[in-house]
Each structure stands twice: as C-alpha cells, then as structure tokens.
Amino acid sequence: MLFNLSLRYKLPLLGAVLILATALALSASLLATSWGNLHRDMIKNSEDLGQTMARSLFTALLHDNVWQAFETISLPFKEKTESTLAESLIVLDADRRVFASSHPNEHRMTSELSSLGDDFRALDREIAANPEHPSLILESAIASHFFIAIPIASDNVRIGTLIVAHNKDQIWHRFDRSIQNAVWITLLILAVLLPVNWYWGGRMVAPLQLVTRRLSRINAGELAPLDPHLYPYRDEVGALYLAYRQMLESLREKLLLEQEVVKQEKMAAVGRLTASIAHEINNPLGGMLNAVSTLKRYGPTDPLSQKTINLLERGLSQIRDTVAALLVEAKVTSRQLTVHDIDDVMLLVAPSAHKQNIEIDWETNFHDTLDLPSTPVRQLLINLALNAIQAAGQHGHVTVRTGTGEGALSLVVENDGQVLSAEHQARLFEPFSSFSQHGNGLGLWICYQIVTQLKGAIRAETTSTLTRFVVTLPLNPQGSSE
C-alpha cells in the first residue's frame, strides 16, 4: 500500500525513512567510536597508573610496609582524578595473597585472591598461568569486572602484583552520558531535517501533481496552460513543464486545423449543394419567366389579370435573383481592380447609409491598378459594407479601409452595432443563416465563396464595442485576371 500512495506523501515518507536510517547509523557509529575510545583510554590510564605505582609499591612490599602500600594505592581515590574510574586497587604478594587494598573491608589482608569471588578466581588462574607476563588484561563478557594485572618488580625480580579492578556498571554509567548526548543531538537533527524534508518533498511533487491533473483533463477537451513562472528551473521537472507547453501548443494547432478543415469541407459541401439546386431551378425558372413575359404581352388586358401577371413576374424575379446569388463565380472574365471601383462602391452604398443616418469613413490606401478581378471584389466589398450598415443601426458608424501590403489587398470593414455572439460566429458564413430580420442570409456566404475562389482569407473579429471583418486577397491569385 505504501508504493500506491501519492508521491505527495510517498516521497516525504521515504525521505523521512532515509533520514532516520542515516541518523541512527551515524549515532551508532559515533557511539561505537566513543565506547572504543573510552575503553582504550581507560586501559591506557590504568596501565600508566599501575606502572607508576608499581615502582613505589616495590619498596613497601619489599620492607613489608603495609601502611605505605595502603597510602600509595589510596592516593588516586583521594585526588578524584581520571584514574578513579577504577573501582579498587589491590596489592598481591608473591603468593597471590592480598597485601594491601584501597577497599580493605572488601579485600581483607592475607586473603587469597581466589577467595574474593568468581571474577577474582578467574584472574588468579590467569596470573598463575602467566607468571612472567609484563602486563595482563582479563575481560570476560559474563563477568561483572575486568582487571589489569601489573607486576611489581625491579631488575627482573618480581615480588608481587598490582591489580586494577574495574566495575563494568561504572563504565556503562559514564558511557550513558555519551548515549544521552547522542540521543539529544540526533533528535535535534531530526527536528530540523524532517520538516525540511516534508516541505521540499511537497514542493517538488506539487508541480508533478499539477501536470498530472492537467494531462488527465486533456481528453475532456480542457487545454489549460501552465504558468511558466510556476517552476522556472531547468531540471527534469522543468523539462516536463516545457514538454507539456509544447504538447499543448501542438494540440491547439491541431484542433484549430481540424476545425478549419471541417468548416472548409462543410462550406464546400453546402456550396456544391446550393449550386446544384440553383442550376436545377434555373431551367424551369427561365421557361416560366418567358411564359409570364409572353402572357403579359399577348394575354388578357383586364386589370385583375395584369395585376396577377405582374405579381407572378415579381415573385419569379425574386427567385431568379436568389438563384443568381447562389451561383456566384469569381473566375469570370473581368478587368483589373482600380481605385475607381472603390469610389463606385462608395456611391452604391451611400443611399443605404443615408437612409439610416450612418456615418461612413472610407480610407483608400492604394492608387495603382491591382492584379485582381474587379467584379467579384466590388461585389465582396458591397456585401460587407451593406451588412455593416445594416448591423450598425440608426445613427451608427462604419469604417471601411482598403490597402495593399506584402503582395496582397486588405479590406477591413467594421461597425459599432451589436457585437456577434459565439453562436453567430460559429455559423457566420453559412448560407441562409441570417441574424437579422432583413435579408436572406446569403451576403456573407457569397463573400466567403468569393474570397475562397480568389485564394484569400476572411475572418470576423469582435471587441466590446466593434465588429470587424478582415479580408486578405493575394494579388494575381490565378496567374491572370483576364
């Protein structure tokens, strides 16, 4: 279950375990070193003390001066020096009987060494087995004491032995202070490192969690970006952030491309359908118009019949105009576009603008003849201008800008009427999708068809107060316009 936890918890926990293991290992190593140093120093101090006393004790033992020997071995306990770590000092004669002791009540004079207890009995056997040993250390894991036996001799004449006895409980009591210090230092280190480990563990995992959440939502269509300042470093996590941003940009481009392809295919299919329907309508429509014209010329002359014939003619003419709009074609033979064509458009749309008290600003920024067919461009600009006038409403404002640059003609038409909603923008260039009470919804569709045939681009932009149509038409899009 630990490995299934979130990295938000698993990483700090594993870091805490590592810190604990390291702290315990270091503490154990330091304690082992401290114990070794304490044990080594104790033996060395005891040997130095014994060697020093052995020279003084030789005379006392030689002259059977018990009092002098007692004074000598009692001196370290009176001065409270480091050597007082020893529990007792015992002077033995040549027969391994107690000659003097720092604790005479426990080690009575003339007592045999083996009679002082099990630990001393083992020491007695060891001394007897090694009579010529210069210095003897006896330490047993099951004994409560350990001993250092130093010969009392001069000129290779040994007349006794000095025993330095140590109680293991006293040594452990002294070592306990080292253990307590190690424990407190370890706890202090853990108190500092564990919170830092938890904080940095969470800080390192938080960016990964954020990327994981964002990646899990991509299938739902959420392409939420990541703040580049959230993790500005260039390590593996920073590389992951960069890869996520690059993937997001690629997905957005792919999504936009797919949407554009679907839109293009949809518009092309609608265009083919409407053109096919228009051609099918044109044949019977032409015959009906001819029949109405003949009937009007040679038919009955009474007012009611003439009124009915005129009504039929107007209805069929309206159908003919609608069908003609569906059959828009930019590849017809046409002269090249000049600045006078823009002036003509200004004159053609002026009555509609005057009728609604619309103020139109025209900005024409080219003067040469352009390698574009004039007829479809004029129709394109008229449709956009009339749509803008209609959308601006009474006392509105329309701006029309034309100009050239980078091998293309740009047309910008904007108005300050009601802005387009998201729903309107999604169906903006579809036929019969009128968003007002006037018109048949073919104006923008025709504009789209003309721009497509001229290999250009058209887009709609909206702000809080303006609706803007931007058209870009490459010059000489078909090699020749005539």
Image: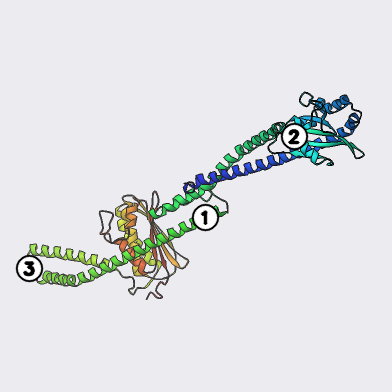
Q: Secondary structure at mark 1?
A: helix
Find out whether the residues at labels 1 and 2 contact each other: C-beta distance under 8 Å.
Answer: no
Residue located at (7% from left, 65% from top): 302
Residue 429: x percent and y percent?
32, 60
The CA span between labels 3 and 2 is 157 Å
Image spot of residue 51 (x, y percent):
86, 36
Q: Secondary structure at mark 2?
A: helix
- The crowding category of the residue bearing disc 1, from other C-alpha atoms within 10 Å (few below 14, some 14 to 19, many at least 20), is some
Give, as a three-letter code, the residue at label 2: Arg
Left/right of residue 345 with respect to residue 310 in the rendered view: right
Disc on the earlier residue, 1 or 2: 2
Residue 41 appears in view: no
Q: Are marks 1 and 3 in contact (CB under 8 Å)?
A: no
Which of these two is toward me, 384 or 364? Answer: 384
Tell me the colour scheme of the image. Answer: rainbow
The image quarter in which residue 173 lies = top right
Q: Nearer the viewer, residue 441 or 179?
A: 179
Q: Which mark is residue 224?
A: none
Q: Residue under label 2, please give it.
A: 121
